[in-house]
Image (cartoon, rainbow, N blue to C red):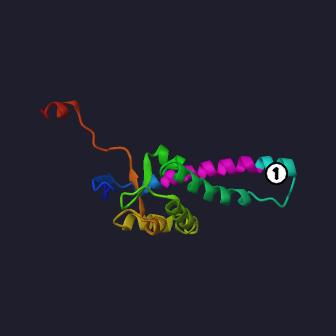
Amino acid sequence: MRKIDITTTQNVTIEYELATVMERSLAAMLDILFVYVGSFIVYAIIAATTRSQMFNLLYISLPASFLYHLLLETLNKGQSLGKKIFKIRVVKINGEQPNFFDFLMRTAFRFIDILMTSGTLAMIAISSSEKGQRLGDFLADTTVIRLRNSDRFTLSQLISVR
């Protein structure tokens, strides 16, 4: 498991496990599912009430995808619904709390990293970078970490610590 040391603003260094490509990919797939189900419901309501043939699902889903990631990560301390389910979170490399502009940068480059290349560029960048960053993360100075601790102890190990 790849790890990263992040020094907080209080000058305390904390070691985190980086989220794996698989965890990030599965969280992204869940997010896509949430966005498109929500977009389809809104589209169905609009199509039923206006009866317009000119209206397209993309008119809803693209802005919804952009706003979904930007707003949820900003308001939810670096977690979209998919990230929350997989217990991963966006953090700044320098230990500060990510701000709106960091999430805006990540979201803007999501279209290049993920949508334009079907996720291939993001997977290659995350796998090959030391800090597990895709292009949007690199530009925003962020990465995605695991929140759950993978260290597990048995009762016999705890008893032997005395």
Provide residue 23's location: percent of width, then percent of height. 44, 52
Q: Which quarter of the picture shows residue 94?
A: bottom left
Instruction: Give the percent coordinates (x, y) of residue 139.
Output: 46, 69
- Determine if residue 114 is in view: no
For this orientation, the residue located farthest to the front is 10
In magenta segment, residue 7: no
Q: Quadrant of residue 63?
A: bottom right
Q: Position of residue 133 (x, y in %)?
A: 41, 64
Residue 18 visible somewhere in the drawing: yes
* Quarter placement of the C terminus: top left
Q: Report the residue at 61% width, 48% height from top.
A: 34
Q: Is residue 115 above or below residue 8?
A: below
Element assignment for label 1: helix
Identify which residue, 156 or 134, lies in the foreground: 134
In this picture, residue 124 sits left or right of residue 74: left
Which residue is found at the position 53% from the left and 50% from the top?
Answer: 80
Q: Is residue 17 left or right of residue 126?
A: left
Q: Which residue is mark 1?
A: 47
Q: What amino acid type should be assigned to the residue bearing mark 1?
A: Ala
Q: Nearer the viewer, residue 41 or 99?
A: 99
Which region is colored magenta? Answer: 25-43
Q: Is 46 situated left or right of 115 in this image? A: right
Say if the magenta span includes residue 34: yes
